[in-house]
């Protein structure tokens, strides 16, 4: 007899049918109290989640692999699945299994993917989870970034591939959506890796169909938003590609969510020209919102300035920081608002206090619109709206700056929604919206009547018990209730003979019998019915209230926006006041003048009073005497990188709308900011090839304008000294002569300082070092001039290299200096400056130049730094030190 196919059962057929429709998802099917997953998905789920892999029919020669999680624990497991790049389809029971005969009907309820999940457990309060749709893998390209929880879709056009890369770096998509044809390309992963600049791209999905057709998308969006044209949202008629990206993102999100996501209706057009352009390196190197160590928030610019009281405030601030403005007028408005709240300390304190009563309005609105809200959410909404109103009243007593004045009308709760919610809902409603207990008494007469029936219960029962006890003359007669049997009359076994005919036996206990009577049954029906009807009625009233809120989605989103703006400007005022920051003067010049500037993050790490402030003066205008390019030399660990980064951060803060960590700041608006860190220093990418470094440098040289600011840190280090030096030299010349932009170049090539002698726009500076006996102190103060020594040996000693090695190194250095002096001008590279001679004791002759090179040197010579990962470099240094110790013994 043929064995039956284990996959050919009604249940497995049901599972496999849905799986066929969503082959790229891991399908979890609800079965009783579990969500189960089968076959290959089961094996993968078991591996990712660390759950047990079992099988459905253990005795069969071909058992079906199965794994499962308790239904209440599914959300808990989701982050791991999403982190592994999975999309998860959830299949639920569409009917009560108890009521159904045979196979329970099941259907797909939603798909959870990294970019579309809106479950609170999966969202971080202070950062967005974005689904980003792109129409091409190379520029020109339209990009839509969709914040489903908050309800906004931003669209932007990227003219070329670098612009696309920079946009993707800014959005940091949780999931990327592509047209199906691109998704299926063989070289997709390679293209994405290039777009992500060597970093790991997010999970990616393809979307088929006409969704991406620009005309169709345009029509669809107009219909959805109930507008005749998208021009009002800044999308011109000939920019339908933008509509295509937006429509694709929204449709995919809706498909996945399995509901209407009606709040997803704020379409915002962003224009590259309005913003200071920061590419991916810049965002990474300057650690604006994510650090390089683990991608977290610690020690980032955002973490340092974020004094927001609300989560949406923090999210808005993060957007401001990665998207600083390039236009003076709106910036003035932000600075004006910050200045106002800085001066009005009392008002600011009250505002921040009021904001504590504001919940995440943006996401609350999303929950309400997608049908996931419960009564507690509505209470939070009401609390937020009450607070908004209080805030608006507070401000009305002051003459406000424009930005704030624009926000206030949005804070008024014009038709008393908050009032209505607080009037109808009890203060502490339950989590469930199906169990009653949400609506106050006195709101609805029908509900009140039902409740009266329910609560009359106690009186009627007591009376009935009394009456029956009297009638039978049995004082011990009791009326009670239990969940399984309902209401009953209980009598001791010994009274069984005295029971009247109207009593029907219901349950027998050890010593007693329980009965029901027609009156008691009637009563039971009425009470139990009341309970059910109360639940239904409360749910109806709740739904009505929610529907009333739904008609106000636009207003509520505007209030949410206004509150976030106020939160951010108040936070910026707070940080300005606490940290002593100044209001920057912004204008269209090409100058940067900072007095007593600090690096906000390093300063915060060092603690109060330990950071040494420095000035910075740059001007790309040749008419002025101020140099446009600074060559900064100085020993390792002196503070070069910190200094050049703090200038970039001051520009970003100023153009984001913040005050800056300086005593005085004058900044000519910067159009693009570039930072390049020499290969090997940028650990995050784990690719230390010189090629990459040069490609990046090429991008700067090709894209910087006279209004740009360029920060170069140790560029050229990824190759041999002379190559690197020559390139650094030529790059500096080009930046100065051809581009004429503002530039800070920190370098260990002392030779570059010669350029200052030849060009008036280039200036040398170095970090002050104090020498005391044998000790060297880094003053962290930037002064004019070039470094004369590198103090590498000093740094090595600080780092704990053994004394014998240090002593040996000193001898070697002295010898090398002598050797260098002995070389005639001809032998020395023309750009190399004369090094200071070492006077005093004449060092002993070094054997390394006289005899065979030591094994250590041979090993060193065999190394190629380009081939080493940071980890390997580390291990190699360890090995070399060990070797050196052996040789010095
Ligand atoms: P470099 O680039 O010259 O090697 P860094 O800029 O990386 O040096 O600075 C090294 C360390 O010196 C920093 O981590 C910080 O602790 C300290 N430092 C840098 N600049 C300052 C400063 N202005 N004031 C106080 N400490 C500083
Ligand atoms: Mg450095």
Image (cartoon, rainbow, N blue to C red):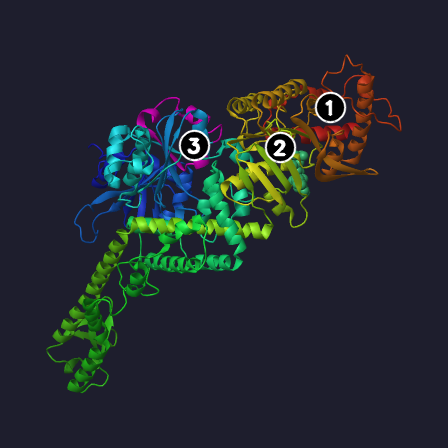
Residue closer to the observer: 686 or 127: 127
Secondary structure category for the residue under label 2: strand
Q: Residue at x 63, y 45 (%)?
A: 663
The residue at which mark 1 appears reads as 856
Which mark is first along the chain, 1 or 3? Answer: 3
Circle 3 crowding by C-alpha within 10 Å: few under 14, some 14–19, many from 20: some
Residue range of the region highlighted in magenta in the rendering: 170-199
Q: Quadrant of ligand 2?
A: top right
Does the stretch in magenta take in 543? Answer: no
- Between label 3 and label 1, give the one nearer the viewer: 3
Secondary structure category for the residue under label 1: helix
Q: Is residue 22 left or right of residue 574?
A: left
Secondary structure category for the residue under label 3: helix
Residue closer to the observer: 356 or 581: 581
Position above or below: 461 against 245: below
The residue at which mark 2 appears reads as 618
Q: How far across and how far down the image is residue 3, in percent?
A: 22, 34
Which mark is first along the chain, 3 or 2? Answer: 3
Per the rendering, the mark at residue 228 is none
Q: Is residue 868 visible?
A: yes
- The quarter of the rendered structure image containing the N terminus is top left
């Amino acid at each position: 007899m043929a064995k039956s196919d284990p996959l050919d059962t009604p249940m497995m057929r049901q599972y496999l049918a849905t799986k066929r429709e969503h082959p790229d998802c891991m399908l979890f099917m609800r079965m009783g109290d579990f969500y189960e997953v089968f076959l290959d998905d089961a094996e993968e789920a078991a591996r990712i989640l660390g759950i047990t892999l079992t099988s459905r029919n253990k005795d069969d020669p071909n058992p079906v692999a199965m794994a499962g999680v308790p239904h209440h624990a599914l959300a808990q497991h989701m982050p791991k699945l999403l982190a592994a790049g999975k999309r998860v389809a959830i299949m639920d029971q569409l009917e009560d299994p108890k009521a159904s005969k045979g196979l329970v009907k099941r259907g797909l309820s939603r798909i959870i993917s990294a970019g579309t999940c809106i479950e609170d457990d999966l969202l971080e309060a202070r950062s967005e989870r974005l689904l980003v749709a792109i129409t091409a893998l190379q520029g020109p390209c339209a990009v839509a970034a969709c914040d489903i929880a908050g309800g906004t879709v931003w669209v932007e056009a990227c003219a070329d591939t670098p612009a696309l890369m920079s946009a993707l770096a800014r959005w940091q998509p949780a999931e990327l959506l592509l047209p199906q044809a691109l998704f299926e390309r063989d070289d997709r992963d390679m293209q994405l890796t290039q777009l992500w600049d060597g970093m790991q791209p997010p999970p990616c999905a393809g979307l088929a169909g006409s969704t991406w057709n620009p005309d169709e998308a345009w029509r669809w969006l107009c219909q959805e938003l109930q507008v005749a044209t998208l021009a009002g949202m800044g999308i011109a008629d000939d920019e339908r590609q933008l509509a295509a990206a937006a429509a694709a993102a929204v449709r995919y999100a809706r498909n996945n969510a399995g509901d209407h996501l009606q709040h997803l209706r704020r379409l915002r057009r962003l224009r590259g020209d309005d913003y200071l352009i920061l590419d991916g390196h810049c965002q990474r190197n300057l650690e604006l919102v994510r650090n390089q160590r683990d991608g977290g928030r610690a020690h980032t610019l955002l973490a340092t300035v974020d004094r927001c009281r609300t989560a949406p405030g923090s999210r808005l601030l993060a957007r401001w920081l990665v998207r600083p403005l390039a236009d003076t007028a709106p910036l003035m408005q932000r600075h004006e608002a910050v200045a106002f709240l800085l001066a009005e300390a009392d008002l600011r304190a009250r505002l921040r206090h009021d904001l504590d009563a504001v919940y995440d309005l943006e996401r609350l609105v999303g929950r309400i619109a997608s049908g996931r809200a419960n009564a507690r959410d509505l209470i939070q909404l009401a609390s937020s709206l009450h607070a908004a109103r209080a805030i608006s009243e507070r401000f009305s007593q002051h003459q406000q700056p424009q930005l704030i004045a624009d926000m206030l009308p949005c804070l008024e709760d014009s038709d008393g929604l908050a009032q209505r919610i607080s009037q109808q809902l009890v203060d502490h409603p339950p989590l469930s919206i199906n169990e009653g207990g949400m609506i106050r008494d006195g709101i609805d007469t029908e509900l009140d009547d039902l409740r009266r029936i329910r609560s009359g219960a106690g009186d009627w029962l007591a009376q009935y018990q009394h009456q029956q006890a009297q009638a039978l003359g049995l004082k011990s007669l009791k009326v009670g209730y239990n969940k399984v049997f309902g209401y009953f009359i209980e009598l001791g076994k010994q009274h069984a003979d005295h029971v009247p005919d109207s009593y029907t036996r219901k349950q027998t206990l050890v010593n007693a019998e329980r009965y029901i009577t027609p009156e008691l049954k009637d009563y039971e029906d009425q009470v139990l019915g009341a309970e059910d009807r109360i639940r239904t009625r409360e749910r109806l009233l709740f739904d009505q209230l929610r529907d009333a809120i739904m008609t106000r989605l636009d207003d509520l989103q505007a209030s949410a926006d206004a509150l976030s703006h106020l939160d951010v400007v108040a936070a910026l005022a707070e940080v300005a006041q606490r940290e002593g920051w100044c209001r920057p003067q912004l204008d269209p010049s090409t100058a940067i003048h900072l007095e007593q500037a600090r690096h906000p993050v390093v300063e915060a790490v060092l603690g109060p009073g330990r950071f040494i402030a420095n000035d910075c003066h740059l001007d790309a205008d040749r008419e002025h005497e101020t140099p446009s390019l600074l060559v900064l030399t100085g020993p390792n660990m002196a503070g070069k990188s910190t200094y050049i980064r703090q200038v970039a951060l001051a520009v970003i803060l100023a153009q984001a709308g913040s005050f800056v960590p300086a005593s005085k700041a004058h900044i000519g608006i910067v159009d693009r900011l570039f930072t390049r860190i020499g290969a090997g220093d940028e650990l995050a990418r784990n690719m230390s090839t010189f090629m990459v470094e040069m490609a990046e440098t090429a991008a700067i040289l090709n894209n910087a304008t006279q209004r740009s600011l360029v920060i170069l840190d140790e560029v050229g280090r990824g190759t041999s000294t002379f190559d690197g030096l020559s390139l650094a030299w030529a790059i500096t010349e080009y930046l100065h002569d051809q581009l004429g932009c503002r530039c800070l170049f920190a370098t260990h090539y002392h030779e570059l300082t010669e350029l200052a002698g030849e060009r008036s726009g280039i200036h040398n500076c170095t970090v002050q070092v104090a020498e005391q006996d044998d000790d060297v102190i880094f003053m962290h103060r930037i002064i004019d001039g070039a470094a004369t020594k590198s103090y590498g040996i000093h740094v090595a000693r600080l780092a704990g290299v053994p004394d014998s090695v240090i002593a040996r190194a000193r001898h070697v250095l002295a010898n090398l200096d002598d050797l260098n002096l002995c070389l005639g001008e001809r032998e020395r590279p023309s750009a190399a400056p004369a090094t200071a001679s070492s006077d005093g004791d004449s060092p002993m002759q070094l054997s390394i130049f006289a005899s065979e090179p030591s094994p250590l040197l041979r090993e060193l010579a065999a190394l190629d730094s380009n081939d080493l990962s940071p980890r390997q470099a580390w291990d190699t240094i360890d090995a070399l030190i060990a070797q050196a110790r052996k040789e010095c013994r």
